[in-house]
Image (cartoon, coloured by chain):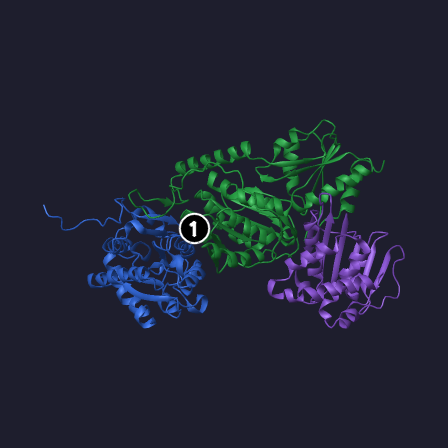
Chain colours: A blue, B purple, C green
Amino acid sequence: MKVVFERPSALSDKQTHYCPGCTHGIIHRLVAEAIDELDVREKTIGVASVGCSVLAYEYFNCDMQQAAHGRAPAVATGIKRVHPDKVVFTYQGDGDLASIGMAEIVHAAARGEKITTIFVNNTIYGMTGGQMAPTSLVGQKTTTSPYGRNPEHCGYPIRIAELLSTLQGAVSVARVSVHDVPNIIKAKKAIKKAFEVQLSGAGFSIVEVLSTCPTNWGKPPLEALNWLKENMIPYYPLGEYRTPEEVK
Amino acid sequence: MAEMIFAGFGGQGVMSMGMMVAYAGMIEEKNVSWIPSYGPEMRGGTANCAVVVTADEIGSPIITEPDVVVAMNLPSMTKFEPMLKPGGMLIYNSSLIDRKEGRDDITVIAVPANDLASELGNTRVANMIVMGTLLAKTKIVGVESIKKALRQVLPAHRHDLLGVNEDAMKRGAEYVK
Amino acid sequence: MAKQLMKGNEAIGEAAIQAGCRYFFGYPITPQNEVPEYMSRRLPEVGGVFLQAESEVAAINMVYGAAGAGARVMTSSSSPGISLKQEGISYIAGSELPCVIINIIRGGPGLGGIQPAQSDYFQATKGGGHGDYNLFVFAPASVQEMVDLIMESFDIADYYRNPVMIMGDGTLGQMMEPVEFKAIKKRDLPPKDWATTGCVGREHNIINSLALVAENLEKHNWKLQEKYKQMKENEQRWELYKTEDAELVMVAYGTTARIVKSVVNKLREQGIKAGLLRPITIFPYPEKAFALLPDSVKAFLTVEMSAGQMVQDVRLAVNGKRPVHFCGRTGGIIPTPAEITKVAMEIMGGER
């Protein structure tokens, strides 16, 4: 029988712990497909972060290091400086990257560290049970913003792709979404391109992926995808914020 | 055993003076240590370093009762003269210090280091004038060892200054003959 | 190689390079700035990498990454910076990664001062970060000893897969002494087949300190403890000075031990039989040395540049058999021979 669909070799056969309807699974697969298509699994070292994706080291079938909360870009820096010929990526959520790890991501980008960051933004802390994230939208209800995020009190959500695209070392910055098939295909292209940028040695690359959290948003999966489209995309516009071509 | 403190303004060369004595001691296969004062006082104001040269094992590199104090300016003399061991030696730069009174249980030697250096046409070697005096009076290390040390402390592109430094040492020694 | 006069902090850098360290990640802080400065100059010469991180937190996590990737790697800092690194150090210990960490201690707490202190003894020897772990900790007393111990530290770190800390103070970092870089006795080191080097023809390697199943985490903890037990059995190091007939044994490490050595001689001139027990490893603590002391010992005097930290380990080792006294200065003040002598005389009943 002809094989028409299979698990990418860069994904292990471990069953993930992600909640039903969560889009982490899709994003994992896109990353693994990109690694497979570029045929770099055996020279890839991934860095898992703290948050829902903490166990990513079990799901990606390549060498992996687990990092402290927010520190994945620093850990990846250490690895890449030792093995400049390897492909090094971090996989981080919004609490990890945009809150506690803001210094590490900004400086890794500023240094033009030749790593790739997959930044999963679902506007909430998932693992700890739905607290407000630095990317939570104005008015969004979370367990620590029960009346809705009030910018008077805690400011406005941070746009990471825009912020990092001001840095010279960040040569490839894109924001994509995985709420429907056309966007998943675009996301895949962006992720693959980010890895290609790393392989070319041009500098730091990051793909911000808008993602859902049905469990902590308190919405069924389909409704969650719709909420992403209607609420997140207007605040977090999709697109390429910086490409190696324009850097040149 | 010789425990020495070299002190003065930043830029008077007291740190390198101490370092050269330590180097020379090492060349003579003695045990040596050199430790600077560090911190905000390094940035302007007074600088000092403590040097131990001895045939024995060195205990504390930090000196509380020096045998010798070299003071290149007044604040240094005021600070370190009281610490001298009874019978110790104070060498001070009389070009900049007008010493009216002080301890009488120590040997005191005045050297007009800046004036003598000017006579040689280079005020920057005032420290080496005092070095000459120190060696003449204490024999802590030999002049030849200091000359070797100079070659190590001065970077190669400054070796044109070896002559004037050696002249300064000679002048400082002659002055107290 | 001939002897050269080197500043402690620079000798640290050279010793690391001689030991095969090719990666250094750090952040400026007084009084250890000459270490990163030296590394930034020397590492490129030997094909290594120096990187000034954005913070101590980032630096230690770069160390974690590089150590996980199989490299010999070092970082250096001083007290407030070492506090910031504790999170990363705990991860490194938990993930069983080898690395060398230099702490040139300054007075605390808080921002404290920049003068020498030994007030981070608890932090260095009792874990420091969260969780049941220990660093291997050396406390050298001279620049030469520091060089020798650093060169050995990389082997020890690899051998035990455990971070090694070199605990010095501002004095040791800033002073110049003659040093010689001598080849060390090599240990039999296992290959780093656990490192993340790319999974060519093998299962993927994972560097990790997370274990969500309590039974597994407990098992991991007992494994770590077994390692510390081995260190206690095999690695204790100390120096005994004039203790053969001593009635008063003074216990001190690092810079303080050198001052105490002078005090021992002063006391002997005055007829007091004093000796020095100088721990060289402070984890594992040299308990064995206490068993070697003669029955003539009447009392112990611990001298530290702290309010009294190592004295607790001395009391544990002495186990109530003799009185243990303490003499310390804090905040960056170095105790003078005179004041230590006075305390010692009081303990021994005055002048004879």
Q: In the rendered image of this protein, does residue B43 appear above or below residue A34? A: below
The reply to whether residue C235 is in sight is yes
Residue B79 in picture, x, y percent from top left: 79, 60
Residue at point 65% right, 42% down?
C253
Q: Is residue B105 left or right of residue C328?
A: right
Residue B169 in picture, x, y percent from top left: 75, 62
Query: Outermost residue, top direction?
Result: C295
Query: Quarter holding the N terminus of chain A?
Result: top left
Residue of label 1: C66
Q: Is residue C305 left or right of residue A52?
A: right
Residue C38 is drawn in which quadrant?
bottom right
The one nearer the camera, B88 or C1, is: C1
Residue C137 in picture, x, y percent from top left: 56, 42
Query: How many numbered callouts?
Result: 1
Say what secondary structure mark 1 lies in: helix
Q: Is residue C26 left or right of residue A160?
A: right
Residue C243 is drawn in which quadrant?
top right
Which amino acid, by three-letter code, is at mark 1? Ala
Residue at point 72% right, 55% down?
B144
Judge the density around disc 1: few (<14), some (14-19), many (≥20) Cα neighbours within 10 Å. many
Q: Is residue C302 left or right of residue C101?
A: right
The one nearer the camera, A128 or B75, is: B75
Q: In the rendered image of this protein, does residue C86 appear above or below residue A104? A: above
Residue A158 in picture, x, y percent from top left: 39, 66
The reply to whether residue B12 is in sight is no
The one nearer the camera, C351 or C200, is: C200
Give the chain of mark 1: C
Query: Quarter holding the C terminus of chain A?
Result: bottom left
